[in-house]
Image (cartoon, grey):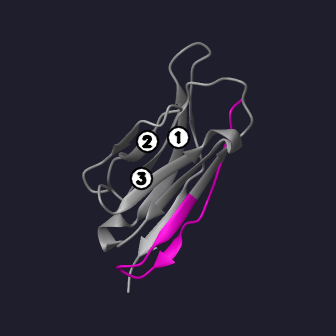
Amino acid sequence: QVQLVESGGGLVQPGGSLRLTCTMSRISWGAVTMGWYRQATGKQRELVATVTSGGNIRYSDSAKGRFTISRDNSKNTVWLEMNNLEPDDTAVYYCNARRTVTPTFNTWGQGTEVTVSS
């Protein structure tokens, strides 16, 4: 069973930076897309950024220009570097790993809280 462990959330002032880390338990398959989603209080979970095992990256409009997703396949780890944070970025951030070919899976981390406030 695939497991994800996240770290790096916290309280930061507007304009500050945070780096989130997500490590996936060892797997023997490739073709896994990893990414970050977030859910603010009272809102639906939304995409922040994803990166395929081949390095193709997708960002939400709100993340473009401020957030950077990166990945090390040898470490089964994905990072989200968040700069120029705004109060609207306050949310629980969830790591996701999915594979759409057999064996398929769609796994979520436990979430890490990010609060942007002065």
> Is 19 contained in the magenta span?
yes
The amino acid sitting under disc 1 is Asn
Pointer 2 residue: 50
The x and y percentages for residue 16 are 41, 78
> Which residue is most to the bottom?
118
The x and y percentages for residue 90 are 39, 67
The x and y percentages for residue 58 are 35, 41
Gap in angstroms between the C-alphas marked 3 and 1: 10 Å
Q: In the shown orientation, is residue 83 left or right of residue 10?
A: left
Marks 2 and 1: in contact by CB < 8 Å? yes
Q: In this view, does 48 lie above or below 65?
A: above
Gap in angstroms between the C-alphas marked 1 and 2: 9 Å
The mark that comes first in sequence, 1 or 2, is 2
Pointer 1 residue: 96
Q: Assess disc 1: are there few (<14), some (14-19) or many (≥20) residues with their C-alpha within 10 Å of its C-alpha.
A: many
Q: Assess disc 2: are there few (<14), some (14-19) or many (≥20) residues with their C-alpha within 10 Å of its C-alpha.
A: many
> Which residue is most to the top?
102
The amino acid sitting under disc 3 is Arg
Residue 76 in which image quadrant:
top right
What span is colored magenta in the figure?
A: 1-20
